[in-house]
Amino acid sequence: MSLTTLIVCGAAIGGGTALLVRELAPSAPRLGPALRRLDPPAIRSGDQFHRTSSSAAWARHLAERMPTRIPSSDLTLLNQTPEQFFANKTALALLGILAPLIPAVGWILMGLPVPLFIPAGGGLLLAALLWFVPDWAVAREAAKARTEFAHAAAAWMDLVATRMASNVAADQALEDAARIGRGWAFTRLQEALLRARTEKSSPWQALADLGTQLRLPVLNDVADIMRLSSDDGASVYDTLRNRAKSLTHELLTAEAARANSDSEKLHTPAALLAVIVMIAMAFPAVLNIFSI
């Protein structure tokens, strides 16, 4: 095999591995979409199509015609577009189709006969597997993001209760508490409350809509609690504090269960290592017995 072929095969394998790691590794929220949501540019009629790049256009065309389910709430939570999601799926599927051709070309260059159905079948199987990798990655990252948001929401409810204990109005307490916090979760809360104030709508309805859109039940709970304060004039200080405590307890219980599960998974490698050591210690004695 020539040096050029080795370089090309190594570059293709390295590129595929890097793309797979990029899909599976967690990524930080992108700053650009968040800034565009805060200050969206004015879009004139007909400008949207011209502003879209050719790659985004074909990805959108693909997304509109795919029969598969789009995890819209997960993508919105992670600040990803359906076009980007389907572009990743397509790229990985093409990588799976082309990956078996690399060893097949190497075998052919070495003079070994390679039936065509082997790389073709392997490529289709690998493409079908890699097609679902973005779905698994998005679902896993969305689950982590919802857990992180729940932690932030527990702190946010405590801050709202503290502000309302100082005789601050409910809508103002929600905005003040959201401005105190840092991180993407508080940014989402600030955006929802700012949108509600701009549109002259109730902030609890904006929180309920955000909770339904992103599948965050804690926001629906906060919206119901604050709506009770608005309709009946009731004090919701104790209700908010109790909800925050119960949410914190749920999160700590889930963390403890996850830690116990991880600890139990460590027993298997330890037991396997013990078996290997026992086999290594007993092997010379068994060998001597059979050699007698």
Image (tube, helix red, strand yellow):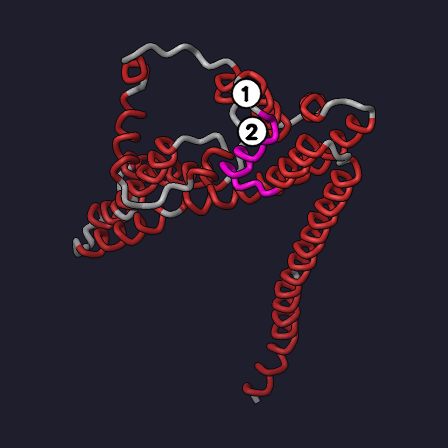
The residue under the point 47% across, 39% down is: 74
Measuring from the top left, give residue 68's x and y in whole percent.
32, 45
Magenta segment includes 210? yes
Query: Along the line of sight, which residue is nearer the eye, 235 or 76?
Result: 235
Snapshot quadrant of residue 184 = top right
Q: Counting other residues with Cα less than 10 Å from the Cα at mark 2, is it few (<14), some (14-19), or many (20 or more)? A: many
- Residue 206's disc number: 2
The residue under the point 48% across, 17% down is: 36
Q: Residue under label 1, please give it.
A: 195
Measuring from the top left, give residue 141's x and y in whole percent.
52, 41
Magenta segment includes 228? no
- For label 1, the SS is helix
> Label 2 to label 1, Cα distance in Å?
8 Å
Query: Along the line of sight, which residue is nearer the eye, 141 or 124?
Result: 141
Figure check: 221 above or below 55 = below
Instruction: Looking at the image, tell me whether mark 2 or mark 1 is earlier in sequence order.
Output: 1
Q: Is residue 113 visible?
A: no
Q: Counting other residues with Cα less than 10 Å from the Cα at mark 1, is it few (<14), some (14-19), or many (20 or more)? A: some
Tell me, yes or no, whether the two marked residues, 2 and 1, touch with CB atoms within 8 Å: yes
Stretch of the chain drawn in magenta:
202-217
The residue under the point 52% across, 21% down is: 34
The disc labelled 1 sits on which kind of residue?
A: Arg
Query: Along the line of sight, which residue is nearer the eye, 249 or 87?
Result: 249
The disc labelled 2 sits on which kind of residue?
A: Ala
The residue under the point 19% across, 55% down is: 114
